[in-house]
Image (cartoon, rainbow, N blue to C red):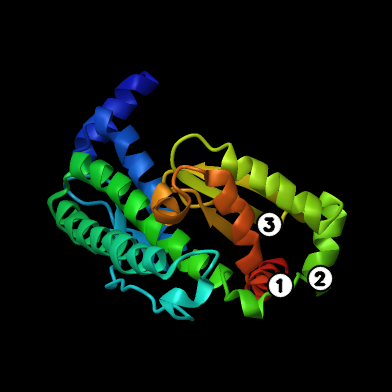
Amino acid sequence: RTRATERSIAYRLLSIPPRRTTIMAAVISRARAIGKMLSMPVTLSAPGPAFAATAVWSRGKHSLPDLPYDYSALEPVISGEIMELHHSKHHQAYVNGLNAASEQMEAAQAKGDVESMARLTKAITFNGGGHINHSIFWQNLCPKKDYRPPQGALLTKIDQDFGSLEKLQASLTQATVGLQGSGWGWLGYHKETDQLYVKTMANQNPLQCGTPLLGIDAWEHAYYLQYKNVRPDYVKAIWEVVNWADVEARFEASSS
């Protein structure tokens, strides 16, 4: 009996069309990754009549987080008008999209609809990523009057991995300004290699290779009303309102 025959028998016993297994594996892998970032428990169900295993979403209703400051608190770097639209409209839209897609995912799971699950995983990645990224972004910022440079273990690590704070800023600025289309510029930390690094992510894809410490939103809705299409001016200015105390706390939690 050939391996192909054995696989065919197994597929029939489990009622899994062979062409669907690749889709299913991708859905499970992506669901686990996104669920972890969203604090949504994702487990594998027992084999069922429609498919052998599937990602099970334990969905909780997501909500828009409050800002730790007033909409106008980041002026003149970021206008109150931009902050209000960005938070109450754009971030809220990601939250709404995430909740809707999660509900639809549960319905697709119940039906064993693998194709819909694959499609909805993309919607959850986009909207869930938007929710994750913005929730970090708001905390990464502070009023200009409260700004202070990084210190302690984070500053030591910045000097070790980049040479200086100025060199880190230059590296993240260059990467974010040079990002094609919409996306994010990130300072991340990889615990396994004990390394700080700069990386850009397209669209709302969340940073997955390590822990996100500091993000710069490079979507035009984050700056266009004030800076028009001059992204370099926006990225240069945003360093004046970085909340390094928050970045330090994220670094300490991820490196301990």
Label 2 neighbour load within 10 Å: few <14, some 14-19, many 20+:
few
At x 72%, y 54%, the residue is 192
Disc 3 marks which amino acid? Answer: Tyr
Viewport quadrant of the N terminus: top left
Residue 71 image-quadrant placement: bottom left
Which residue in the protein does label 2 denote? Answer: 153
Q: Is residue 36 above or below residue 253?
A: above
Label 1 neighbour load within 10 Å: few <14, some 14-19, many 20+:
few
Q: Is residue 125 above or below residue 36?
A: above
Q: Are marks 2 and 3 in contact (CB under 8 Å)?
A: no
Q: Which mark is residue 97?
A: none
- Between the C-alphas of marks 3 and 1, the distance is 10 Å
Q: Are marks 1 and 2 in contact (CB under 8 Å)?
A: yes
Disc 2 marks which amino acid? Answer: Ala
- Closer-to-camera residue (144/138): 144
- Between the C-alphas of marks 1 and 2, the distance is 8 Å
Which residue in the protein does label 3 denote? Answer: 189
